[in-house]
Structure formats: structure tokens, C-alpha cells
């Protein structure tokens, strides 16, 4: 059972050829790019949050929702103009992991299928990629709210 299958000389030659032509990825450089671009997104988000606090009388707790909506909207605009794709190529996960990646995912599917019409193309495909994210978020929020309600009823919190 634990015996490993022997490789033929052709397979060994192919593996050597593959290793010679494999692209070396600069992991540290990619991590640093993702870190600083993700951090820049966070700074922009904090600035937007402070804008809502100082100019629209939100509190720190209530400024989160409009801040997230604004960040998603900005990401959608940047995707529509083709800028977010360049940011994504440069930053990798630094642009995909924040909430702006959600906006990019929604609008990218819409743009890709716009030739099929507004209803079947844009509307039908808008949440194709992001639908699973929405479903998971709504379901998770339901489960957490249910657990919290039970714990409150039992007097634990």
C-alpha cells in the first residue's frame, strides 16, 4: 500500500523541464504589495467614516454602514472605468479581500454579461459570483442572532 509508483524516464525528464520553465513568484514582494494596498483601502475607509461622523452627525457605531456602502460604490465605479483591475493585478489579495473586492465581483459579472441585455445579462448575472457571499453572510448573521437570543433568554448575557 505504501509503495510509491516508479516514474518513467519520460516523466522524470518532463518534471525537470517543468521546473526549469516554472515562473518564480516573488512571494515577499506580493505580500508587501497586498499589505500596503489593503492598508491604503483601510485608510480611505477610515477617512470616509470620519467624514460621515463629522459632517452628517453619525456616531462611530452608526457610521459603519454608510462607509461600507460608499467603499463598495467606489470600487464599482473604479471597476467600471477599468482602474480596479489594474489595482488588483498589482495588489492581489490586498484588493480582493476588503469589502471593495465584493463590489468588484458584483460589477465585473454585470459588465461581462451586459451584451445579453439588462434583465437577463446584467440583472441575472450581477450576483452570480457574489450570491454565495451574500447567502453565507445572511445565514451566518441568522445563526449568530439565534445563538445570542438563546443566550439572552437563558440569562448568560
Image (cartoon, rainbow, N blue to C red):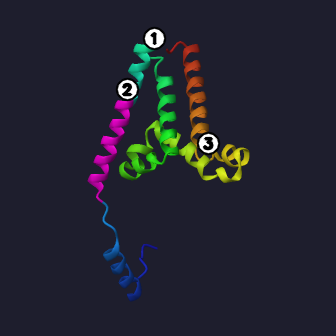
Who comes first in sequence, dot 1 or dot 2? 2
Mark 3: secondary structure? helix
Q: Are marks 1 and 2 in contact (CB under 8 Å)?
A: no
Compare residues 21 and 10 and report the one nearer the observer.
21
Asked if the stretch drawn in magenta spans residue 37, the answer is yes
Mark 1: secondary structure? loop
- Residue at mark 1: 57
- Residue at mark 2: 46
Q: Residues within 10 Å of mark 3 (few under 14, many from 20)?
A: some
Q: Is residue 86 left or right of residue 153?
A: left
Prevailing secondary structure class for the magenta stretch in the rendered image:
helix
Q: Work out whether residue 51 can be spotted.
A: yes
Q: Work out whether residue 8 can be spotted.
A: no
Compare residues 35 and 115 and report the one nearer the observer.
115
Compare residues 55 and 24 and report the one nearer the observer.
55
Q: Residues within 10 Å of mark 1 (few under 14, many from 20)?
A: few
Q: Is residue 154 above or below residue 135?
A: above
| Distance CA(mark 1)–CA(mark 2) | 16 Å
What residue is rendered at 46% in x and 14% in y? 56
- Residue at mark 3: 131
Q: Is residue 152 above or below residue 73?
A: above
Q: Residues within 10 Å of mark 2 (few under 14, many from 20)?
A: some
Numbered range of the magenta stretch: 26-44
| Distance CA(mark 3)–CA(mark 2) | 27 Å
Asked if the stretch drawn in magenta spans residue 21, the answer is no
What residue is rendered at 58% in x and 18% in y? 149
Residue 104 image position (x, y, % from top left): 51, 43
Mark 2: secondary structure? helix
What residue is rendered at 35% in x and 80% in y? 17
Amino acid at each position: 500500500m505504501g509503495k510509491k509508483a516508479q516514474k518513467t524516464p519520460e516523466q522524470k525528464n518532463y518534471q525537470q523541464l517543468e521546473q526549469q520553465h516554472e515562473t518564480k513568484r516573488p512571494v515577499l514582494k506580493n505580500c508587501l504589495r497586498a499589505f500596503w494596498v489593503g492598508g491604503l483601502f483601510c485608510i480611505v475607509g477610515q477617512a470616509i467614516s470620519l467624514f460621515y461622523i463629522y459632517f452628517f452627525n453619525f456616531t462611530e457605531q452608526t457610521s459603519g454602514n454608510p462607509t461600507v456602502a460608499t467603499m463598495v460604490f467606489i470600487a464599482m465605479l473604479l471597476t467600471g472605468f477599468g482602474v480596479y483591475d489594474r489595482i488588483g493585478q498589482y495588489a492581489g489579495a490586498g484588493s480582493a479581500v476588503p469589502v471593495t473586492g465584493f463590489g468588484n465581483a458584483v460589477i465585473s459579472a454585470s459588465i461581462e454579461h451586459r451584451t445579453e441585455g439588462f434583465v437577463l445579462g446584467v440583472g441575472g448575472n450581477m450576483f452570480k459570483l457574489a450570491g454565495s457571499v451574500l447567502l453565507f453572510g445572511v445565514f451566518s448573521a441568522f445563526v449568530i442572532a439565534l445563538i445570542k437570543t438563546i443566550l439572552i433568554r437563558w440569562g448568560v448575557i
